[in-house]
Amino acid sequence: MYYDAMVMGAGPAGCMAARALSDAGFKVVLCERERLPRDKTCGGFLSPQAASLVEEAFGPIPASCRDVPETVRGARLLCAGGGDYELPFSGPGISVLRSRLDAHLAAHCGAEVMDACEVGDFRAERFHVTARLITGGREEKVEATYLVAADGAESMALRLLRPEFHRLYAATHLERSMLVLSQGEMDWDQEWIGLALVRKGMGIARFFVKGDLIGLAVNHDAARGWRDELDGLIALLGERTGLRLHGDVMRRISASNRMAAAGHYSLGAGSALIAGEAAGLLDPWGFGIRLALESGRVAAESLAESAGERITPHIRYRYRMQEILEREVKQRRDLSAGVGDLDTTSLSAGGSRAARRDRRALRRRFSR
């Protein structure tokens, strides 16, 4: 089967790319390894910028995709030294169920969707992509002119397209995230996402409350297990919010690609473009939905603009993404206005010794 474009991954980046390409008249196939709807290890919070991008391309987000709390005001950052900072969004965000949202986006992206479909391997040449797809034990060959790879932190596409880059930067900056979900109690306003700087922690821990369900997320690698990270977060929240967990505990593991902390991004090569976390597009807090949507749209637009030209789409994509990449690098150093979708004025304005110490600690975490 031949398509104008093949998209790998039915997350926000892949669905946005498929939607924009379909709107431009391309015949598109969207391949997703898991069967939709599928669980996603994610808090499920959309900033107002991310929500606007979804609604511009797909229309209003249906009630069936929404979760509690109905609105999200931003994040609160708790620092081990005692600092407590409100980092608001520019407007109200929303809480969603990622499994339902991603399935909704895939169903309305305008592409032929192949879920429970594993890409065994592919070969990308100049304006020609050949892929081997495995579905239900059967293999199928698919050909396309273009490829948009949005296959997440452990991107097979990045490994095949740029093996040396993958070995030096992506593989060495791959971290695991452990999300623990449990019933419990804590003194916390559900409309605020929780961020925490724990002493000697690897990165920025995250937590949230949805109803009587509490989520705690920590990063870890092979050298430092997740239990120490989680114990540090629980101790901090017990002291500051009165956290008490009870009942059964559910654990979910996911991967995070942190190569952007050192300024490393990979946008693909030739007519094969990489978007979302596969490209390294996570903001310094570890959030990636808005960047996934932005890069998916820009990748599709770059392909559409390049159609019929001799110039390879990667060059146009790289040029159009440059402003976004420079913004992300700058925000890891400068806390004066905002980081990601969060207003960091309260963090940058503090002149006390404790506030200066918290800023230094935060910059160190951003660069890990």
Image (cartoon, rainbow, N blue to C red):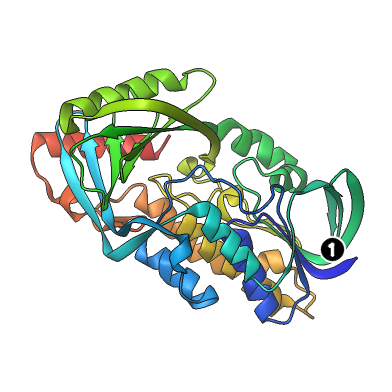
The residue positioned 10% from the left and 34% from the top of the image is: 353
Relative depth, front residue between 335 and 277: 277
Q: Is residue 120 left or right of residue 368?
A: right
**Residue 196 visible somewhere in the drawing:** yes
Relative depth, front residue between 206 and 238: 238
Relative depth, front residue between 342 and 93: 93
**Residue 127 visible somewhere in the drawing:** no
In this figure, which residue is indicated by the disc labeled 1? 126
Q: Quadrant of the N terminus?
A: bottom right
Q: Quadrant of residue 106?
A: bottom right
Q: How many marks?
A: 1
The residue positioned 67% from the left and 44% from the top of the image is: 155
The residue positioned 35% from the left and 36% from the top of the image is: 204
Q: Secondary structure at mark 1?
A: loop
Q: Quadrant of the C terminus?
A: top left
Q: Is residue 133 left or right of residue 95?
A: right
Against 161, is 29 above or below?
A: below
Q: Is residue 165 left or right of residue 39?
A: right
Residue 136 percent location from the top left of the image: 84, 46
Residue 133 percent location from the top left of the image: 85, 51
Residue 299 percent location from the top left of the image: 63, 67
Residue at far left of view: 352
Name the residue type under label 1. Arg
Residue at far front of view: 247
Residue 352 percent location from the top left of the image: 8, 39
